Image (cartoon, rainbow, N blue to C red):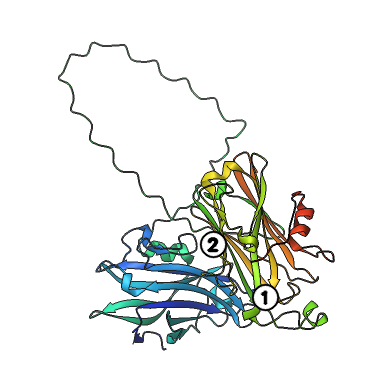
Amino acid sequence: MLKGSNVPVPAPAVRVELAWRFGPGVPDADASALLIASGTGKVRSDADFVFYNQPAHASGAVRHEGKRSSPDGVTDTLFVDLARVEPDVERVVLAASADGGTFGRVPGLSIRVLDAASGAELARFDSADATVETAFILGELYRRQGAWKFRAVGQGYDSGLEGLATDFGITVDRPVPAPAPVPATAPPTPPAPAPAPATTVPAFPAAAPPPPAAPPAPTPVRLSKVTLTKAAPTVSLAKQGGSSGALRVNLNWQMRKQFSGWGAKLGRAVANHADLDLDLCALYELADGRKGVVQALGNAFGSLSRPPYIHLDGDDRTGAVTSGENLTVNLDHKDQLRRVLIFVTIYEGARSFADLHATVTLQPQHGAAIDFSLDECTVPSTVCALALLTNNGGDLVVQREARYLVPARGVSPQRTIDKEYGWGMNWTPGRK
């Protein structure tokens, strides 16, 4: 499509894919959506902004599904159920923001609109003229005479996601600068003036009751997100605002080019993608000393409403962000948790993590998203420690582990990771 052109969208629900090619020095990018009220050009409230820190709209019409990597590049996906978009919303603005650079350094930037049911491509717009922009409106879904259409926009901002969001009426939480230090040689504070002499106040009728207090101002939207690295591997959930609600952990994997590294040495080390089965798991230790595991093996899916307050939502073989391996921690009971080790094992379809590329995202219900990528695997590993959550005085601290372990012959991945982290549990064979 050309900039400014439009096409009908005949599907009742669509997936919108923001795509680009990665490489050295290429900034990360994030997809977002804004639900714009009829006749105003603005959102109705901050809740009409859907992005990585606010991934689902209350109406269920729009949700942020997250990123996937492939040999061709990266996609960040939004799901839009057009049939559920509220009547007073006239359009859904589809935007992108660059993290760590400008869009002039992002090759292959494009947006595709796909039929959510069939996967058929309904529209595509390739952006080829980006320079210093750090945010982009790539397109919009809008109503016209009772039907939906897609328009290619291509409007850039050099003020980032904050500038784009505030332009549509979003209130953004800006960091408050620390107060300036007081010089050590500051002059002494002058004494307070003496109080005025007391006087007799004549009696008056009782004053009318004060007006009711105004409702509290809405909490501004937080745009910050956290990426854990080797140099900065830990983060406090409380300091990021994620001290309550649900913490969702997502494992997203893609196959690299086959038969390189250990994959080549082990022959068919990696089977085709449909046969690959990775399992997201968690070892836990409660405050009262009880220990256990949450995993698909043995149907130990856990629970959010009772100990261990950790739940695995199912067993998936696709690696997709929406239906893939997702594990949830109930932060409302974080005081009952002493430590939680999140790890992943290869159940079948590969003999090692070589030739697999995986990313981990921890999304608190309140607070900034936390994500990191796994390093390339160079050993014949079938189990990888992802992240360790430790209770530090009531605050859960997340530490990036990203450690590939090699089980000894005849030793299960679970026993291997238990021994490495000193959990001290007894293990018996299990099956799905």
**Closest to the observer: 185 or 332?**
332
Q: What residue sits 63% from the left and 48% below the top?
A: 397
Label 2 secondary element? loop
Residue 141 against residue 246 in the figure, above or below: below
Label 2–label 1 contact, CB within 8 A: no
Residue 106 placement (x, y as % from top left): 57, 77
Foreground residue among 145 and 381: 381
Q: Which residue, given by chain and number where applicable, does mark 2 sit on?
A: 313
Q: Position of residue 280 (x, y in %)?
A: 63, 63
Judge by depth and name the residue closer to the eye, 349 or 213. Answer: 349
Determine whether the residue tagged by mark 1 lies in a helix, strand or loop: loop
Amino acid type at circle 1 is Pro
- Which amino acid lies under the numbered mark 2 shown in the image of this protein? Asp
The quadrant in which the C terminus is found is bottom right
Residue 412 x, y percent position in the rendering:
77, 63
Q: Position of residue 128 (x, y in %)?
A: 50, 84
Q: Residue at x 53, y 57 (%)?
A: 224
Please identify the quadrant where the N terminus is shown.
bottom left
Residue 407: which quarter of the image?
bottom right
Residue at the location (58% across, 70% down)? 316
Q: Label 2: how many residues lie within 10 Å, few (<14), some (14-19) or many (20+)?
A: some
Q: In the rendered image, which quarter is residue 164 located in?
A: bottom left
Q: Is residue 81 left or right of residue 370?
A: left
Q: Which residue is denoted by mark 1 in the rendering?
A: 24
